[in-house]
């Protein structure tokens, strides 16, 4: 999109001789075009891996909030192309894979594209998708349920404001289909380190699934900007 202006609608069509296609339109966008982007992890670039084993998922936001894993047995794997979404993704095995972001920063709106990577109809445990390294849940599954966890108001960061594909619901069924998890903070505060793929360092609470992208802002985005992130 070099030379194009973000937020500007562009129109195009193809002509062959006297024949022309219908007119199409697009609006250039990337997450950092919106103010407050604190974290942008995308599996199609800036993944430090060797033979598919991921050591670092580098932050594209400019804030340097890289996700890392120094223990080989806990590294997720990088898939060059996940055929369902035709995109690279990180794969977490549900047994011991996770990444750490060892930084403290505030989050408002968060977006994660993910799935649960088997044919189960319910989550087996309180499987952590994205949590604090300390006490706070951000996105954690509810055990023996197709839903995400919504109890413990004092520690559940997005309680009442969890969205799945822009619908205010906790129901992730069918688990194996890709969806965009998002949240709006009830009260924006700092998170003291993050975990991707595990619930707060608790054994047996790992995520089994693919993650192509994670985006966080330090503000709650309005409806228009939320749609831009969903649609890009």
Image (cartoon, rainbow, N blue to C red):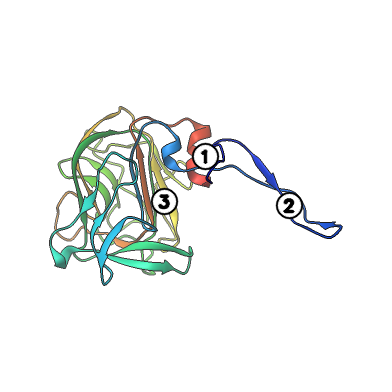
Residue 79 located left or right of residue 102: right
Residue 71 vs 23, above or below: the answer is below
Classify 10 Å Cα crowding around label 3: few (below 14), some (14-19), many (20 and above).
Answer: some
**Tag 3 residue:** 171
1 vs 3, front mark = 1
Q: Please provide percent x and percent y for residue 167.
A: 49, 43
Q: Earlier in the sequence, mark 1 or mark 3?
A: 3
Q: Please provide percent x and percent y for residue 70.
A: 13, 59
Most distant residue in the right direction: 18
Task: Kindly tell me whether residue 81 is visible in this rendering.
Answer: yes
Compute the Cα span from label 2 to label 3: 40 Å
Residue, x 33% and y 56% (percent of image)? Answer: 145
Q: Please provide percent x and percent y for residue 164.
A: 44, 47
Residue 45 vs 39, above or below: the answer is below
Q: Earlier in the sequence, mark 2 or mark 3?
A: 2
Residue 203 located left or right of residue 179: left
Q: Earlier in the sequence, mark 1 or mark 2?
A: 2
Q: Which mark is residue 13?
A: 2
SS class, disc 1: helix
Residue 214 vs 32, above or below: the answer is below
**Tag 1 residue:** 227
Compute the Cα span from label 1 to label 2: 25 Å
């Amino acid at each position: 999109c070099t030379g194009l202006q973000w937020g500007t609608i562009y129109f195009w069509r193809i002509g062959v001789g006297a024949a022309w296609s219908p007119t199409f339109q697009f609006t250039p966008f990337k997450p950092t075009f919106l103010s407050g982007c604190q974290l942008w992890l995308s599996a199609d670039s800036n993944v430090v891996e060797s033979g598919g084993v991921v050591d670092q998922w580098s932050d594209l936001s400019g804030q340097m909030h890289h996700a890392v894993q120094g223990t080989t047995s806990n590294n997720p794997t990088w898939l060059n192309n996940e055929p369902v979404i035709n995109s690279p993704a990180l794969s977490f095995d549900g047994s011991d894979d996770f990444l750490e972001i060892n930084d403290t920063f505030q989050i408002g709106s968060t977006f994660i594209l993910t799935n649960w990577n088997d044919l189960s109809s319910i989550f087996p445990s309180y499987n952590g998708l994205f949590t604090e390294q300390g006490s706070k849940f951000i996105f954690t599954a509810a055990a023996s349920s197709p839903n995400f966890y919504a109890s413990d108001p004092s520690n559940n960061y997005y309680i009442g404001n969890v969205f799945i594909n822009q619908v205010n619901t906790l129901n992730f069924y069918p688990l194996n289909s890709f969806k965009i998890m998002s949240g709006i903070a009830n009260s924006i505060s700092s998170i003291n380190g993050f975990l991707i793929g595990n619930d707060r360092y608790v054994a047996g609470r790992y995520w089994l699934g693919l993650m192509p992208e994670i985006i966080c802002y330090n503000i709650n985005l309005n409806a228009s900007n939320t749609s831009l992130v969903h649609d890009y």
